[in-house]
Image (cartoon, grey):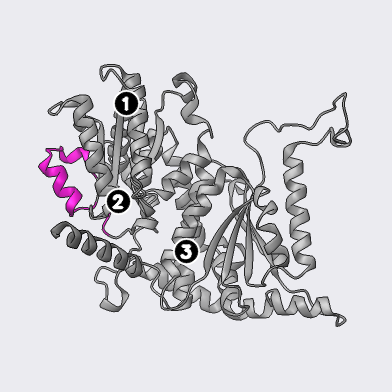
Amino acid sequence: MQLPDEAISYDYRNLLAPAIEDWTPAAEMHQQHFLSPGKLRDLTQRVLQVRSQVATERELRQVPLEMQPLDSGFIDLPQNLLDQSRKSPDASTLGQVMRIAQRMRESVDRFVILGIGGSYMGTRALFDALRSTYHNELPAKDRSGTPRIYFEGNNADSDSLHELFEMLSITCVDPDKRDERWGVTVISKSGGTLETAVAYRAIRREMAEYYGLHSPMTKKLIAPITGATGKLRNLCKADGFAEEDVLTIPDDVGGRFSIFTPVGLLPAAVMGLDVRALLLGAAAMTKRFLEERFETNPVLQYATVNYLMNTQYQKPIRVMSIWSKKLEALGLWYDQLLAESLGKQGQGPTPITAVQTRDLHSRGQQHQEGARDKVINNLVVKAVSQPPIMVGMADRNEDDLNQYNRKGLPDVMQAALQGTSKAYADVSRPTADIVMPTISEHTMGQLMQMLMLATVVEGRLMGVNPYGQPGVEMYKKNMQALLKTSAAQ
């Protein structure tokens, strides 16, 4: 069960325009750039209708052509996986994930994740948020036996992949020693994404050279994750992988919505994360989305407020202002989710991730005094995970910090957040807050499901299909055509 103090909330009160008592230039600016409560009320009924539409879409078995693709399977997936696991622990998807993850943790000290876009970014967000920033530099005993984690296959950068191979060749000499073994998961629903496919072919060569061309160990140290059909599935069959060692991405879940499929669950389990807590958080958010009224529903609130700011207040740039370094990759995951889902038919907000207080010293100037084309959503974490570092007293006070000796870095962060929000409000720059109680598997599950659901709702409000990515497919087709032409010359 989700306790009230574990629940994520969306506080948009600072973004609402106050009632005008006396006209002033500042009051006029507020009316122009802050959200009218009346407009919010007027849209609420339509938003509730959209929720019903999204809920109904989950149950469609035959999808009309005009609605394709309809990758809505992610909505019920977290609860379905938990239910399936309770009924058939060993035979369930979660049981399969946990079995392969345990084998990897027991077998290798380095684990490479090959994937791009939705096959990479959500996992990276979980790793950065929930593991130590210095995870790979810690001794094995301080990593609780979990492998070091590396990400590749997310670019066509030859030097980057070469450096990974170079590191592996230097640190891994004897394949009979667990501390010098490495494994890999390759993630591609179609198997046709060129960047990941090329990286996987190169990885397979490296593994054959290190473990032996026909070593039975190789198949145990590769965990493919792919669709029910496609090039990667065919390659796995040709290589002789056992069916139970290839994890399947559901047909009705698109790449950027796939964090709660094996795409995210297997790497999370290899990292030693509590994947059940992750799924419980996501399932709890789905339940809130489907059942709670607008006034307490962060999915509907976030979608509605940001839709209005984009379409009615000419603020097409959406800044995710993150007040924790640990969540920067989460912001980049959301950038992809929003851009690829809603950037269609000449529409869609432009996402930007900023990490505070770092970026107050760069983008802060533009947000304070630049073009009024932005709405800022602060992502705020209420409680730190570790004991706070205090300013403390010092014999030398030339830095004039002794006056803050009873304050800690969380106090500095809170003062910066409040000071920045006030500075923006004073010059009619709207902000709202996504509030996380703390960073945990449960809250990350909530947050990622909330943002995925809100993106679908906003897409339906806009009249665009939030699923599919026809623009991305065009670059892939052009790239492959050019490669084929050059190869024939």
Q: Can residue 1 be seen in this view?
A: no
The label shown at residue 195 is 2
Does residue 260 show up magenta in the picture? no
Left or right: 372 as drawn, with respect to 216: right
Where is residue 160, by image quadrant?
Answer: top left
Type of the residue with mark 1: Ser
| SS at circle 1 | helix
Asked if 141 appears above or below 365 in the picture, the reply is above
Extent of the magenta region? 227-251
Closer to the eye: label 1 or 3: 1
| SS at circle 2 | helix
Answer few, some or many: residues within 10 Å of disc 3's Cα (few below 14, many 20 plus, some between 14 and 19).
many
Type of the residue with mark 2: Glu
The label shown at residue 425 is none
Q: Of callouts 3 and 2, which one flags the residue occurring earlier in the amino acid sequence?
A: 2
Q: Residues under labels 1 and 2: Cα distance?
A: 22 Å
Do the residues bearing badges 1 and 2 touch, measured as CB atoms within 8 Å? no
Left or right: 234 as drawn, with respect to 160: left
Q: Of callouts 1 and 2, which one flags the residue occurring earlier in the amino acid sequence?
A: 1
Q: Residue at x 81, y 29 (%)?
A: 392
Answer few, some or many: residues within 10 Å of disc 1's Cα (few below 14, many 20 plus, some between 14 and 19).
few
Residue 184: x and y in percent read 30, 36
Where is residue 408, by image quadrant?
Answer: top right
Type of the residue with mark 3: Leu
Left or right: 124 as drawn, with respect to 425: left
The label shown at residue 169 is 1
Kindly identify which residue carries mark 3.
338
Residue 133: x and y in percent read 54, 35
The C terminus lies in quadrant: bottom left
Residue 74: x and y in percent read 37, 57
214 or 164: which is nearer to us?
164
Do the residues bearing badges 1 and 3 touch, measured as CB atoms within 8 Å? no
